[in-house]
Image: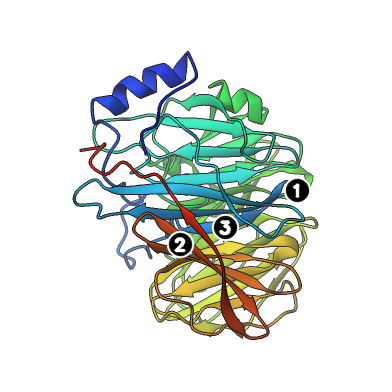
Amino acid sequence: MIRQLARAGVAVFLAALCGAGLLAGCGSQPARVASSGPPPVPTPLSTSLVTAQGTWAIAVMGGTAASDNNFWQLFVRPAGASRWSLVTPEGVADNGGLVAAGGSTSLVVGVRPSQHLSFSPLATSTDVGRNWTPGLLDADLADTPGAIAVGPSGGALALLQDGTIQAAPTASAATAGQWAPLTTLKALAASAPGRSCGLTGVYAVSFGPGNAPMAAGSCLRTGVAGVFTDVGGTWRSAGLALPGEGWVQVLGLTATAGGNAALLHAGNSLFAAWWDGTHWAVSAPVTSGTVRALGFGADGSAWVLPDSGRAEAIGGSGGSWQALPPVPPGTTTLAPGTGGSYDALAVAGSKLIVWRLIRGAWAKVQLISVPIQYGSSG
């Protein structure tokens, strides 16, 4: 969405580009090392995440991507609250998609470039999205929900479209554009663990125990998940394997209080996995076709929304998948609530309908009208 800017500096420059119609269209999947393996499974940008500030959800609204009328939006349900608010950072057309990551005190949002742009606007909020500090990553963020990570010590990682991983010492430094290369897809694939698994692509970044940078993707070696940690400048395998499951792709990776949680795709199945820094615990599989949304909750919980419309959720390490009731029409993403409940965020043009799972059934609890300016990115 293009809105009236109230900021100077980078935001003014971005507004000029938006007015010229240069921020429109959709992105593509991140770069891959040439291989004879299967094509990557699409990793949808529709997602939700939980931080100390609250629960955040990303959904696409408006019209079709073909007419540049698809506008990505960010919503928040503050901690302890029951209602959602629209908090999309102002000033930039976001047809290319949004990615987000949160730390203990802030949320960083990246706007994916599209069409002629080769950089990604950033925005950081420390007050639940009421105010945003604009920034810039002078590169194109990858088209995956795990393209940004914020660590417990405040450091940040960014996964670029060509597979390069950049790092910033703090979230504020990231917003200020103080990024430095950490590794490239080619270098990671040529490392000892990369060669061992036959790394073909990277789809998510995160931080592990000890604030160690992590990268995750897919490998040619069957049964092996490409999850790596950077320990003192040397990349090592995190040792995640699914024996007998064929090619494995990591769809999502996030930090938890005690380690990390991952969502994995292998064959026609999805798995959740949890790492304590030493050992992995892997869930039983759940059958799934194309995944149209996925996300993580607090304490390692996770959810997936397949095309079938029958979402599956899992509560954390040692848990089992639970099928949720068929989601309401138009559901774009889910968001975890309290006591194992979930909200379903459904889209109808410029309206967001929030449904809440109450006593085993979906109940409509909120309607948000989003002021979309159709045709503004054409």
Residue 132 shows up from this direction: yes
Please tell me in which quadrant of the rendered image residue 281 appears.
bottom right
Q: Is residue 60 left or right of residue 374?
A: right
- Labels 1 and 3 touching (C-beta < 8 A): no
Give the residue pinned by disc 2: 219
- Labels 3 and 2 touching (C-beta < 8 A): no
Q: Position of residue 86 (x, y in %)?
A: 53, 47
Mark 1 residue crowding within 10 angstroms, few (<14) / some (14–19) / many (20+) = some
Q: Secondary structure at mark 1?
A: loop
Q: Nearer the viewer, residue 9 or 37?
A: 9
User: If you read the primary sequence from the N terminus, does the residue marked by circle 3 or circle 2 appear first?
Assistant: 3
Distance from label 1 to label 3 (Cα)? Answer: 14 Å
- Labels 2 and 1 touching (C-beta < 8 A): no
Mark 3 residue crowding within 10 angstroms, few (<14) / some (14–19) / many (20+) = many
Q: Residue at x 52, y 24 (%)?
A: 135
Q: Position of residue 232 (x, y in %)?
A: 71, 37
The N terminus: image quadrant: top left
Q: Nearer the viewer, residue 198 or 354?
A: 354
Q: Position of residue 166 (x, y in %)?
A: 53, 33
Above or below: residue 115 compared with residue 363:
above
Mark 2 residue crowding within 10 angstroms, few (<14) / some (14–19) / many (20+) = many
Give the residue pinned by disc 1: 52
Distance from label 2 to label 1 (Cα)? Answer: 34 Å
**Front tag of 2 and 1:** 1
The C terminus: image quadrant: top left
Label 1 amino acid? Ala
Give the residue pinned by disc 3: 48
Label 3 amino acid? Ser
Label 2 amino acid? Cys
